[in-house]
Structure formats: C-alpha cells, structure tokens
C-alpha cells in the first residue's frame, strides 16, 4: 500500500468521534471491548479544554476517513526527565501492513524531539506478536522486567487516603 494516498496531521476536536471509534476498534482487537468507558465529552474536555492533557495525530485516507491514530501525552521520569508517552497507536485492520503505522510512529518521534523529550515510552501486550515485531523492527527495546501497576476507577474511589495527603492536595 503506497503512503502517498494518505494524510497525516495533528488531530483536532472535530476528529474525536472517529478517534473514539478507533479506540473501540482497538479494544475489540485487544479482547476488552467492555473496558472502554471514555466518552466524547471527556475527550473534548481533556484534549481541548482549558488544560489539555493529551495530543494526537491522525491518518486519513483519500475519502477523509480517519484510519489511524497515535495518541500521546507528556510524562516525567525522575531518572531521565521529560518524556512522551504513546498511549495508543492504531491503524484500522484493513489498512495495516502498508507502512502507515510507521508514519504515525514517526510523527510521535518527531513530536518527542520537538518537545525536548529524552525518552519515548509505550506498552504492548505480551501476546500481541505483530505489534511487538513492528516495534522491534523500528529498533525499539521491548522490556520484560517491569510490571504495570494500576488502580482502576473503583479502586481509586475506595482507597483510604491519609488525611495529611488530602491536606497537601487541598493546598495547591
């Protein structure tokens, strides 16, 4: 598949309905369609409100349909400093294996460089062999020694926060 028939660009708010559709497609591929609880309203607030916390690139075909997404945000490493975190990289199944994922990844690398990031990080499921092979082909290191920690929405709500920590948060 030639990449000449596609446009890669920074995402805008009007893209969010199609972006959310791609997120749902990715969740289906990752065998967790019920796990997506994000909404269009939340994405509008979080990406285009007064304090945006994520950015993204989209890939469009000739019909101006969004067929690819790379969503990222700035993170910080206490050991290394500023980094960019690639939350999701997805290309619709029909458009895969033609170099389009590479275009999206390249845009995120360019964004990391432009922002002064010293590291780009992301996760890949241990069973997703095509994605692992894709990243390894690009020269990336796939780590195996780190486990991911997570508190979901319910766990966050029921976690017993120390009173001193609540006071520290209230003082900001």
Image: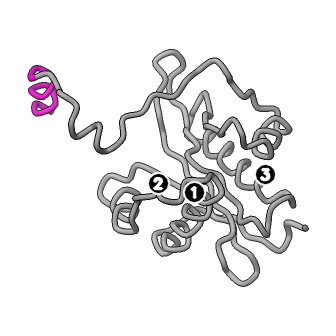
Viewer-nearest residue: 118 or 91? 91
Do the residues bearing badges 1 and 2 touch, measured as CB atoms within 8 Å? yes
Q: Which residues are magenta?
A: 163-172
C-alpha span from label 3 to label 1: 20 Å
Mark 2 Cα-neighbour bin, 10 Å: few <14, some 14–19, many ≥20? few
Vertical placement of residue 19 versus 117, above or below: below
Quarter holding residue 123: top right
Give the color scheme: rainbow, by chain, secondary structure or one colour: one colour
As helix, strand or loop, the secondary structure at mark 2 comes to helix
Residue matched to label 2: 35
Residue 102 is tagged as: 3
Residue matched to label 1: 27
- Whichever of callouts 3 and 1 sits on the residue coming sooner in the sequence is 1
- Which quarter of the figure is the C terminus placed in? top left
As helix, strand or loop, the secondary structure at mark 1 comes to helix
Viewer-nearest residue: 15 or 151? 151
Nearest-to-viewer mark from 2 and 3: 2
Q: Is residue 162 left or right of residue 71?
A: left
| Residue at the image point whose x is 17% and y is 27% from the top | 160
Q: Is residue 149 left or right of residue 2?
A: left
| Residue at the image point whose x is 71% and y is 48% from the top | 105
Quarter holding residue 64: bottom right
Q: Is residue 116 left or right of residue 158?
A: right
Mark 3 Cα-neighbour bin, 10 Å: few <14, some 14–19, many ≥20? some
């Amino acid at each position: 598949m030639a990449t000449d028939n596609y446009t890669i660009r920074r995402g805008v708010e009007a893209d969010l309905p199609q972006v959310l559709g791609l997120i749902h497609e990715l969740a289906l591929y990752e065998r967790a369609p019920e796990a997506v609880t994000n909404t269009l309203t939340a994405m509008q607030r979080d990406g285009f409100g007064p304090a945006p916390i994520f950015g993204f690139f989209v890939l469009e075909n000739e019909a101006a349909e969004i067929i690819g997404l790379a969503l990222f945000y700035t993170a910080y490493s206490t050991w290394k400093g500023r980094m960019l975190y690639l939350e999701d990289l997805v290309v619709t199944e029909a458009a895969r294996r033609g170099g389009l994922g590479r275009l999206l990844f390249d845009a995120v690398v360019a964004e990391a460089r432009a922002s002064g990031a010293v590291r780009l990080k992301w996760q890949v499921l241990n069973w997703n062999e095509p994605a692992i092979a894709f990243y390894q082909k690009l020269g990336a290191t796939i780590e195996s020694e780190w486990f991911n920690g997570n508190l979901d929405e319910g766990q966050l709500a029921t976690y017993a926060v120390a009173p001193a920590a609540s006071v520290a948060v209230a003082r900001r």
